[in-house]
Image: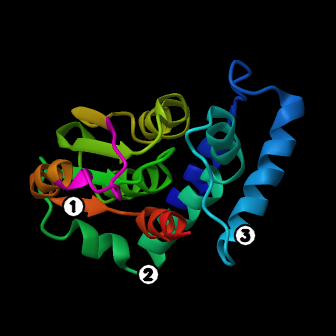
């Protein structure tokens, strides 16, 4: 079962990157992250993912549950089959607000589960913060562990897609992808308004 496999892989060998944050600090950072998310419903802004400690806290506390939830929605609600309809073996997938890659991991796990070979996929990941360390550990490595392969090409871009100067980037990025996920853009837009 894909959900059980994903859950097991996500919780197997979760490694705290002690170069970024030590064990004593992680609880404080997770608590602060929860407070930030709670405050967003009111007047607060979003998390500061430019802070490596915040990214690490998110990767450890939120990423596994988010990836599992995304895959469950794709499997149980028919969304996954709708998303892959018309995609070929050489699909280009873009993710705006990619973060640690929860939706990317879920989608590529689903894609492989439906018989597609990931080694034909081009993956383009965009975020305003540098998630390279967390994304490698929590997404790219897990994709290979689950499917036994990786996309043929993985590009990462650091770009704030809600900034005024993002139009030039987006006008090239959007048409070059067959499918685009925007998991955190609404959150970022709301945070920018405050």
Q: Position of residue 147 (x, y in %)?
A: 40, 41
Residue 1 in sight here: no
Residue 26 in sight here: yes
> In the structure shown, which secondary structural element does the residue marked by tag 2 occupy?
loop
Based on the displayed image, in which of its 4 quarters is residue 119 positioned? top left
Which residue position holds label 2?
77
Q: What label sits on residue 39 in the rendered view?
A: 3
Q: CA distance from mark 3 to mark 2?
A: 30 Å
Q: Residue at x 34, y 55 (%)?
A: 163
13 with respect to 29 (left or right): left
Q: What label sits on residue 115 in the rendered view?
A: none
Q: Residue at x 47, y 78 (%)?
A: 76
Seen from the viewer's position, the closer of residues 101 and 148 is 101
Q: Is residue 72 above or below residue 114?
A: below
Q: Is residue 160 magenta?
A: yes
Q: Position of residue 7 (x, y in %)?
A: 62, 52
Q: Magenta part of the protein: which range?
A: 157-167
Q: Is residue 69 above or below residue 101?
A: below
Report crowding for label 1: few under 14, some 14 to 19, many 20 or more residues within 10 A (C-alpha).
some
Seen from the viewer's position, the closer of residues 89 and 55 is 55
Report crowding for label 3: few under 14, some 14 to 19, many 20 or more residues within 10 A (C-alpha).
some
Based on the displayed image, in which of its 4 quarters is residue 13 positioned? top right
Q: Is residue 123 above or below residue 75?
A: above
> In the structure shown, which secondary structural element does the residue marked by tag 3 occupy?
helix
- Of circles 3 and 2, which is in front? 3
How many numbered badges does the structure rendering display? Answer: 3
> In the structure shown, which secondary structural element does the residue marked by tag 1 occupy?
strand
Which residue position holds label 1?
179
Report crowding for label 2: few under 14, some 14 to 19, many 20 or more residues within 10 A (C-alpha).
few
Q: Earlier in the sequence, mark 1 or mark 3?
A: 3
Q: CA distance from mark 1 to mark 2?
A: 18 Å
């Amino acid at each position: 079962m894909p959900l059980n496999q994903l859950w097991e892989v996500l919780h197997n060998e979760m490694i705290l990157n002690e170069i970024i944050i030590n064990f004593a600090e992680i609880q404080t950072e997770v608590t602060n992250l929860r407070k930030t998310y709670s405050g967003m419903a009111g007047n607060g802004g979003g998390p500061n993912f430019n802070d490596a400690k915040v990214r690490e806290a998110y990767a450890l506390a939120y990423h596994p549950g988010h990836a599992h939830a995304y895959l469950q929605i794709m499997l149980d609600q028919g969304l996954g089959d709708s998303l892959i309809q018309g995609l070929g073996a050489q699909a280009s997938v873009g993710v705006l607000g990619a973060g640690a890659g929860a939706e990317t991991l879920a989608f590529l796990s689903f894609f492989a589960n439906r018989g597609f070979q990931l080694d034909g996929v081009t993956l383009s990941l965009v975020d305003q913060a540098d998630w390279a360390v967390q994304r490698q550990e929590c997404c790219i490595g897990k994709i290979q562990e689950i499917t036994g392969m990786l996309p043929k090409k993985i590009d990462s871009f650091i770009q704030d897609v809600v900034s005024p100067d993002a139009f030039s980037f987006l006008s090239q990025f959007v048409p070059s992808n067959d499918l685009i996920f925007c998991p955190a853009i609404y959150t970022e837009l709301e945070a920018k308004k405050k």
